[in-house]
Image (spheres, rainbow, N blue to C red):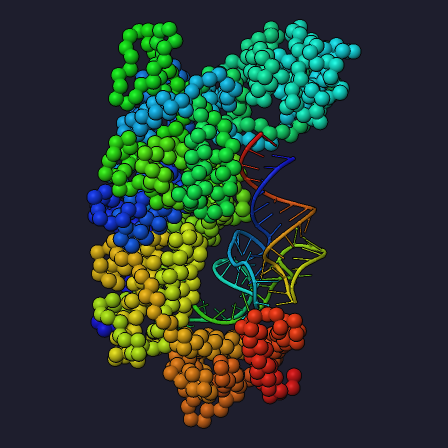
Amino acid sequence: MTDDTAPRTDLPTAFDPAATEAELYQRWVDAGYFAADPHSDKPPYTIVIPPPNVTGSLHMGHALDHTLMDALTRRRRMQGYEALWLPGMDHAGIATQNVVERELAKDGKSRHDLGREAFVERVWEWKESSGGQILQQMRRLGDGVDWDRERFTMDDGLSRAVQTIFKRLFEDGLIYQAERIINWCVRCHTALSDIEVEHSDDDGELVSIRYGTEDDGIVVATTRAETMLGDTAVAVHPDDERYKHLIGTEVELPLTGRRIPIVADEHVDPEFGSGAVKVTPAHDPNDFEIGRRHELPMLTIMDERGAITAHGPFQGLDRFEARPAVVAALRADGRIVAEKRPYVHAVGHCSRCDTVVEPRLSVQWFVKVEPLAKAAGDAVRDGRTTIEPPELAKRYFDWVDNMHDWCISRQLWWGHRIPVWYGPNDKVVCVGPDEEPPSGDEWHQDPDVLDTWFSSALWPISTLGWPDETPDLAKFYPTSVLVTGYDILFFWVVRMMMFDLYAMADRGPSRAVPFHTVALHGLIRDASGKKMSKSRGNVIDPLRWLDTYGADATRYTLARGANPGSDMALAEDWVAGSRNFVTKLFNASRFALMNGATVAGELPARDQLTDADRWILDGVDALVSEVDGHFEAFEFAKLCDGLYHYTWGEFCDWYLELAKVQIAEGGARAESTRLVLGHVLDTVLRLLHPIVPFVTESLWTALTGGESLVIAAWPKSLGAERDTVAAQRIHGVQKLVTEIRRFRSEQGLKPGQRVAARLSGVDDAGLGDHVTAVRTLARLDEPADGFTPSASIEVGIGAAVVVELDLSGAIDFAAERKRLEKDLAAARKELSQNEGKLANPKFTDKAPADVVAKVAARRDAAIADIERITGRLDALPPA
RNA sequence: GGGCGCUUAGCUCAGCGGGAGAGCACUCGGUUUACACCCGAGCGGUCGUAGGUUCGAUUCCUACAGCGCCCA
């Protein structure tokens, strides 16, 4: 049995992401929508991706970051900008080398078995076969990046940028080599910069040791007893009366037989412990400074693996084995005065492998950051770069204003090798990108490579072709926005600001900045607000969400949680809710399409439209401005909420129901309703597209027959005068319908059950045109012959509307009394609150007139409500 | 130890000088021809504590408590 005129009901009732996304994405890429043209006349809009690690795969942090960047670029593209979102990865020196070394270790080999050249080749092979998984995963998220411009920090072009800036900084005296205490990872066998060290409060021990003799001794406390083997002094505060007489004398260092001086140093805290500190200049940054001030010997007692290199019985012991051994030996010698265990103190760990970092004296390369950091700070102080949200700028300043020199050399093989050559007679040559290194056996290149951040600091310029003056650089630099988590502010943002301002300085201050805006988002947490971590086992894999709920739902969830600069909690329920929203949108569109919604044709003149039409059209116009405002302020959570509320709470819940009535009317009314439906849906889909690109693309092409929403125009708010009367009437309809439904519900009527009812007072309330709508939405039939109302309700909408219903059954008067009493209590509370205010002459004198008027109006409404409700209550049979 | 931030409905969060909000969860009812990934109705908060400013404070100020982050 078929009926060609019946609406199609065989359409699926939910969007199927798995069957749709990959194909749509490929179509977008093939059509070249994401390719940016440097020769275009359109204004540029540029975002460079914070390059993910080549070893990494997509985690929630990326998914969030990418959703926001994609939404921003998609909107600008629709607004007519030449939008470029540039993808790529960094080479992650330590992490990548670790991965390949682990592979080698499976065959019992080390990188040294291969040699440097073969090892690096092996890393490249790994990169080609297994690296960059995240790039495929980005496609699944729907990232509209320009794949033709994909970059990698080890590419020739970017390596050339690295070499160029190294040489410039070197020649400007901003790169230097020095022997310093640096953070050393005994597992990775390399130096680390300060920011690659993570501090945590760990259990340790605090041991107090007596140096010198019984009667001529001095007590020092330490958490690292083994380092006493490298002590070269004891330091006290110069004003400390307890020790003044000892300054300049020597004490015996236990276990070693060495005698070390007691020195006076301002930086010793006399309040801490005994007030005397042991000084190990080669194994502690503070002691190093004391050592320099007092020209103390720097005694290195550990090798690069963290094993003790001196002192007979301890030689060869790992630092953590040596610690108890040294303490035991001291105890046997009667040197231990006190021990505290556990003693909680801050311990630095390698951010890559979590090994406890060892301060180590060694020769490394450093960037002298002071002038660069000053310029980076000034760019934000001058407003050439804006940090969003502005509260976080303070953290940026705290960092750039107190930055230590940056250790850039790494004892690795994978990375940009330092372009410095050493020759005979201590000759040092820094080789630029177009220069031949000195030849001859007596010359050799520095073995170290540069910190990965050194190259990623150049990312905004190197990816656009710097140091060459490319069309890309001319068109797309400075970039528009950098989107990243606030935890990366120090790691990466500061470094980009420093290097790129320096490199681009000849463009003038405002054109040199790498980005106009830095938009910072928060961190992803689990449902109870805890940080996600493998050890906690609370990590949510975005790929599973993509599989289960689709890209749109995943993206919407992340965008909806993104309040600027603040962390967001996530749980499965959240994404399920987003999926439900996608389904809702799908079904609303399905309904509209089944009923002939169209954009083919001009909207009828305003006076030809119904109140509902004008209300929903005004609403979508307001929505456009709201969404625009939130986009400009990076308020993703608010714009998602606005879209959700309008789409579900107004369009689906009310307008679609009212539209059913209008369509049922047929004729011109049905036709204009189809146009209104089409127009509103068209706008909503455009507005939602940056956040949920897939479902909107499917629906929009079906609705409009257009080529693609990706290149469709962004809606503009007309800002026309709103029809407040129409809105008021629709709100009246909503209030009346809701009150009737409430009454029905409390009387135990089934939602679908139709009830005969008589309405009066509707004209006085201005709802004369909306009786059919009210009857339809509230399931009320016309009163037939012999209509005998058994119950009635009264709703105040300007005027009182009375609804008399024939419930043809016993009325639950108790429920009705309860309902009215609740309303009465609320009205009385409202009255007393507002009367109280008005009775206070200080309020009426001092408060603004409009506030007083509002309170008075509220009081009057409350009086009317009380009168109406008490009347109903009195009419009820006695309880 | 220094700095910053947070504390609003069961949960996650908006609001930030004049009527306490959202989503989710929960309760009740539902074969409503778009949708049960749904519909309708409802319950739920002395806005961390104590002071202060103000005609009026969840909103501003101070102190305290708890939690979190960054730095040392």
The image quadrant of residue A476 is top left
Image quadrant holding the N terminus of chain A, namely: bottom left
In the image, A217 versus A5, the foreground residue is A217
Picture layout, residue A138 above or below residue B21: above
Please tell me which residue is depicted at 42% across the width and 66% down the height of the picture. A649
Please tell me which residue is depicted at 42% across the width and 39% down the height of the picture. A379
Q: Position of residue A579 (x, y in %)?
A: 40, 55
Q: Position of residue A710 (x, y in %)?
A: 27, 53
Note whether residue A553 is visible.
no
Looking at this view, name the residue that lies furthest to the right: A215
Image quadrant holding the C terminus of chain A, namely: bottom right
Picture layout, residue A320 above or below residue A629: above
The image quadrant of residue B57 is bottom right
Please tell me which residue is depicted at 29% across the width and 32% down the height of the picture. A466
Note whether residue A751 is visible.
yes
Q: Position of residue A806 (x, y in %)?
A: 49, 86
